[in-house]
Amino acid sequence: METLGRLTRRQVDALQMIARAERPGTGVSLKLIASSMKVRPPSALGHLTLLEEMGLVVRHRGKSRLTSRGQSTLMEYQRHHRVAETLFSQLGLSPAATCAAAREVDLSISHKTVEEVCAAEGHPSVCPHGEPITPCSTRKAGA
C-alpha cells in the first residue's frame, strides 16, 4: 500500500506543520505541533509516534524533524492535492472550493490515477492557487 494511503488527514497536517516550522539543524517542539494542530500534546504525540514508526519523522530531545522519506511523502501529497485541485477547477469550482474538494480525495487516489489525471489535464505546471505541480514521472523532460 502506498504511504499516502496509510496516512490520516491529521498526520498529513502534522507533516505539513513540521515542514513549515523546521529550520536547518533544529526540529519542532511537541508543544508547537500540538498548538498548530489544535490538540493537546498527548494527542499530537500519538500522531508523531505513528509517523516515526512509518519512517517519516525522527524525534530527538523533544524535537521532531522530517526524514528524507517524510519530505518525499509530503511532496507526493502536495502533487496529489494540486493535481486534484486542478481537476476540480476545470469543473468550475472556485479556488477555495477546489482546495476543499481536493482534501476529500487527495489521500485516497493512487499515484497511477494522479499520473493519468495529470496527463488528461495537459500536465499543468501550477495549481489554481499558483503553487507548482511536480511534473509527472511519465512525462518526458522538455515535453
Image: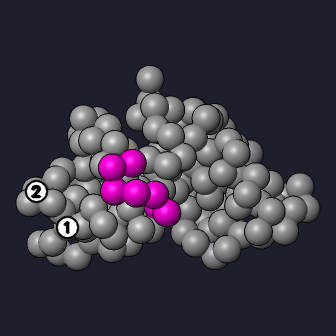
Q: Residue furthest left?
A: 61
Left or right for 84, reference 78: right
* Rendering coords of residue 1 (x, y %): 44, 23
Q: Amino acid at mark 2?
A: His
Q: Residues within 10 Å of mark 1 (few under 14, many from 20)?
A: many
Q: Nearer the viewer, residue 75 or 34?
A: 34
Q: Is residue 136 visible?
A: no
Residue range corresponding to the magenta coloring? 37-43
Confirm whether residue 42 shows in the render.
yes
Q: Is residue 112 magenta?
A: no
Please say which color scheme the image uses: one colour
| Above or below, 114 relative to 17 | above
Residue at screen point 76% across, 68% down: 96
Q: Nearer the viewer, residue 81 or 37?
A: 37
Which quarter of the figure has residue 36? Answer: bottom left
* Residue toward you, 97 or 59: 59
Residue drawn at x 91%, y 62% is 92
Disc with the residue nearer the chain's start (1 vs 2)? 1
Residue at the spot of label 2: 60
Alpha carbon distance from label 1 to label 2 = 8 Å
Disc 2 is placed on an element classified as: strand
Q: Are marks 1 and 2 in contact (CB under 8 Å)?
A: yes
Q: Secondary structure at mark 1?
A: loop
Q: Position of residue 16 (x, y in %)?
A: 43, 61
Residue labelled with disc 1: 27
**Residue 124 in picture, x, y percent from top left:** 66, 61
**Position in image of residue 56 (x %, y %):** 28, 45
Image side of residue 31 versus residue 95, left or right: left
Q: Amino acid at mark 1?
A: Gly
Label annotation for residue 122? none
Measuring 46% from the left and 38% from the top, which residue is drawn there?
A: 7
